[in-house]
Image (cartoon, helix red, strand yellow):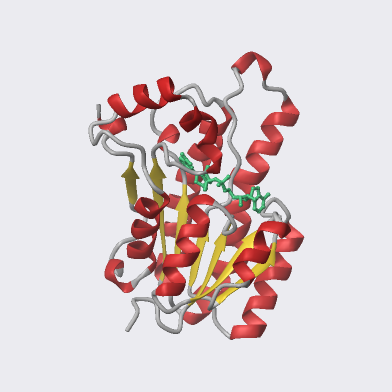
């Protein structure tokens, strides 16, 4: 028996990195998982997996979210889990960030999770149950030179608390994960520089980079009934980096 038997889960950014690992773990645990991503080519791989359905979604589009939510509800009759994971990153300096950069970052990393909750939480409220997991970042909590990326992830943190408060009375839980540096395509540049990689590992109490599975396991806990009395919570998964 799986921990997510018969559940319908949506994972945004499910075609790569952390999202792909969450898709795989949730499907192994018995869920039918919709891997929603803007990268249609990468979604072909998702479509070849058991109990995984790839769906094209630009999380920054209100219209596409409305369409995807309706389609999933009509096809399966219920939606139990939403993982707002899709995101982009940037290390641009303050002086180089213009309004267009800001708007793109906030549209994908901020509006994306907001629109996911806006379109999916009402279905969960009707069902009187559901779990939403938002992926923020340790950079929402400590200054690490990520500037507008950090701001977008701070928005996710505040949004999660607002949504947990708003939807708790109808049985919908909303929690947030704060990954540290995780070895995925997003951080490829870091792991390709041996010197920088060593510095990062040395600076981390648990002496390694994170793996997508470290995040997926925590997402599984928050998605499943094991966390049925937990909402509005925040879990930092960074090997102790931001505790220093
Ligand atoms: N890797 C890290 O070190 C790290 C640390 C903290 C937080 N995070 C967060 O974890 C999440 C996943 O990151 P990752 O490292 O797996 O990155 P990744 O680049 O491997 O995957 C991101 C996925 O999001 C998708 N995506 C991008 N824009 C989209 C859009 N507009 N609509 C739909 N899908 C879109 C991409 O196509 C890709 O499949 C992101 O929100 C990221 O900010 C990552």
Residue at image location 61% in from the left, 41% down from the top? 88
Query: Could you tell me residue 27's position as x and y percent?
Result: 46, 73
Is 63 drawn above or below residue 195 in the view shown? below
**Does residue 116 show up?**
yes
Measured from the top left, where is residue 155 in percent x and y? Answer: 52, 41
Give the total number of marks visible in the rendering: 0
Q: Is residue 185 above or below residue 201?
A: below
Question: Height in image: 58 above or below 125?
Answer: above
Q: Residue at x 23, y 31 (%)?
A: 205
Q: Position of 39 compared to 137: left or right?
A: right
Quadrant housing the N terminus: bottom left
At 70% from the left and 35% from the top, the residue drawn is 103
Quarter that holds the C terminus: top left
Q: Is residue 134 left or right of residue 16?
A: left
Residue farthest to the top, as pictured? 95
Judged left or right of residue 222, residue 113 is right
Q: Give x and y (percent) for residue 75.
A: 65, 84
* One can see residue 130 in this view: no
Q: Quadrant of residue 44?
A: bottom right
Position in image of residue 39 (x %, y %) = 70, 54
Residue 226 falls in image quadrant: bottom left
- In this view, the residue in front, 101 or 165, is 101
Residue at point 69%, 50% (across, down) = 60
């Amino acid at each position: 028996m799986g921990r997510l038997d018969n559940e319908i889960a949506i994972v945004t950014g499910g075609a790569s990195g952390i999202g792909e690992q969450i898709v795989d773990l949730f499907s192994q645990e018995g869920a039918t998982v919709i891997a929603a991503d803007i990268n249609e080519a990468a979604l072909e791989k998702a479509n070849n997996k058991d109990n995984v359905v790839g769906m094209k979604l630009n999380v920054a589009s209100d219209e596409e979210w409305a369409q995807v939510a309706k389609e999933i509800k009509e096809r399966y009759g219920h939606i139990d889990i939403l993982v707002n994971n899709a995101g982009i990153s940037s290390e641009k300096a303050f002086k180089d960030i213009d309004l267009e950069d800001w708007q793109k970052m906030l549209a994908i990393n901020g509006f994306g999770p907001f629109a996911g909750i806006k379109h999916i939480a009402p279905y969960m409220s009707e069902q009187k149950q559901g779990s939403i997991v938002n992926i923020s970042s340790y950079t929402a909590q400590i200054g690490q030179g990520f500037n507008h990326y950090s701001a977008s992830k701070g928005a996710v943190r505040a949004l999660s608390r607002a949504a947990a408060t708003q939807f708790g009375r109808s049985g919908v839980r909303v929690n947030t994960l704060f990954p540290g540096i995780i070895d995925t395509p997003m951080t490829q540049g870091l792991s390709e520089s041996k010197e920088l990689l060593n510095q990062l590992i040395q600076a981390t109490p648990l002496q390694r980079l994170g793996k997508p599975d470290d995040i997926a396991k925590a997402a599984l806990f928050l998605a499943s009934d094991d966390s049925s009395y937990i909402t509005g919570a925040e879990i930092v998964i960074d090997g102790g980096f931001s505790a220093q």
